[in-house]
Amino acid sequence: MLNLCIETKRLKKINKDYASIDSVLKWILVTCFGYTGYRNAKFGQIQVHERITETSRELLTQIKEMAENIGYGVLHGIVDCLLVIG
């Protein structure tokens, strides 16, 4: 699913018809992520939710360090974005 999402992001730059597919895939992934952390979820597992947030945190830290190494400052970071100044 994630690979399909990455591919549609690439394709929507070439053909705008892929923008709606990209949006649908994004919301499916967002919903799945939220469901994994819901304590009453029939099929959710908190370990999956924790691993997703751990990976996100690791990636944001790496990107923050990359930005700082090339001279940018990082003002703030949350969930899936960094506010960079430079």
Image: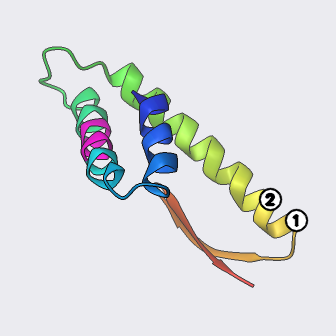
Q: Name the residue under label 1.
A: 69
For label 1, the SS is helix
- Amino acid carrying label 1: it is Asn
Left or right of 5 in this view: 43: left
Residue drawn at 28 percent across, 27 percent down = 36
Give the x, y percent position of residue 84. Answer: 65, 76
Residue closest to the eye, 17 or 33: 17
The single residue placed furthest to the top in the displayed view is: 43
Q: Which mark is residue 86?
A: none
On screen, 38 above or below 27? Answer: above
Give the x, y percent position of residue 73. Answer: 74, 77
Q: Is label 2 in contact with label 1 (beta carbons under 8 Å)? A: yes
* Image quarter hosting the N terminus: top left
For label 2, the SS is helix
Q: How far apart are marks 2 and 1 (CA)?
A: 5 Å
- Asked where in the image residue 50 lies, by quadrant, the reply is top left
Q: Name the residue under label 2.
A: 66
Residue closest to the eye, 36 or 19: 19
Range of residues picked out in magenta: 24-30
